[in-house]
Amino acid sequence: MTAIALSDVTKRYGSVHALDGVDLTVERGGIVALLGPNGAGKTTTFELLLDLARPTSGRVEVLGGPPAAARGRVGAMLQSAGLPEQVTVRELVRLVGRAFPRAVPVDDVLARVALTDRAGRTVTTLSGGERQRLLLALALVGEPELLLLDEPTAAMDVVSRRSFWAQARAAVGHGATVLFATHDMTEAAQVADRVLVVARGRLLADGTPAELMGEDDLEDVFLALTEETSAAHPEGAVR
């Protein structure tokens, strides 16, 4: 079954093409990396999938239907997400869980992300890595079928990253599909089952890390693809 389908999707902001004729299908299950430099169109893709924006042209489907119809089945962890400072971790996870038709018990989801001992603390007391784990808890509490993660490990140390991806893989074991945006090529190669390389609003490559690398390093492949696209399309940056 299909988790995500984009058919000839274009999104324009004035004269800038944030997405330019993207065709993409992601089947359910597994972890998929959306790999691209800043301004590649990754954020715009997430906004379309979450029904926070509409395509200028083309069709977007999430879990077999329009994005708006899938809201209760999708969890998201976004860079732009703000957190209320004076509520406790447990209160916030419980509150968000009420928005979903089938919420995971609060203590269970806190245990999954190793925040049990922080449950009674206010958000303002959390470290950067703990805040990232809290955002993951908020994304997981609805037992989502699709999990969208935007640069999810940016504030984490090595140990926290390993724990984070173990939890993401566990979510896949519970039936979720994970799509994460990153510009970290090493992380994409280590974590993802499939890598989508994007630049300047275009999908440049699609395959497993091994398929894309061949005998080369993924960084070399990435740089070759994105530099070629930049040379061919020198117009303004996208989101």
Image (cartoon, rainbow, N blue to C red):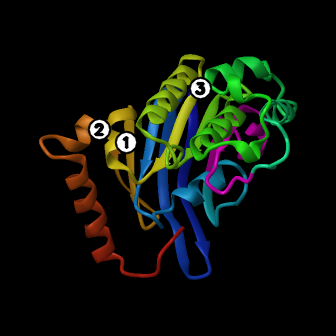
Find disc 1 in the rendering and name its residue. Answer: 188
- In space, the residues marked 3 and 1 are separated at their CA atoms by 18 Å
Answer with left or right where residue 201 lies relative to residue 84. left
Residue in the image at 41% along x and 37% along y: 158
- Quarter the N terminus occupies: top right
Residue 217: tell me if it is visible. Answer: yes
The residue tagged 3 is 176
How crowded pointer 1 is (Cα within 10 Å; few <14, some 14-19, many 20+) is rated as: many
Name the residue carrying label 2: 209
Q: Earlier in the sequence, mark 2 or mark 1?
A: 1
Q: Any magenta on residue 73?
A: yes
Disc 3 residue crowd, few under 14, some 14–19, many 20+, Cα 10 Å = many
SS for dot 2: helix
Q: Are marks 2 and 1 in contact (CB under 8 Å)?
A: yes
Quadrant assignment for the C terminus: bottom right
Q: Residue at x 69, y 22 (%)?
A: 116
Q: Nearer the viewer, mark 3 or mark 1?
A: 1
In three-dimensional space, the C-alpha distance between marks 2 and 1, rounded to whole angstroms, equals 8 Å
Distance from label 2 to label 3 (Cα)?
A: 21 Å
Q: In the image, is residue 176 part of the stretch drawn in magenta?
A: no
Secondary structure, mark 3, is loop
Q: Earlier in the sequence, mark 3 or mark 1?
A: 3
The spot of residue 205 in percent (x, y) is: 33, 50
Depth check, mark 2 against mark 1: the one in front is: 1
Left or right: where does residue 64 sit relative to residue 167?
Answer: right
Amino acid marked by disc 2: Pro
For residue 191, what is the image quadrant? top left
User: Circle 1 — which element?
Assistant: helix
Which comes before the other along the chain, label 2 or label 3?
3
- Which region is colored magenta? 60-82
Q: Position of residue 162 (x, y in %)?
A: 44, 30
Q: Are marks 3 and 1 in contact (CB under 8 Å)?
A: no
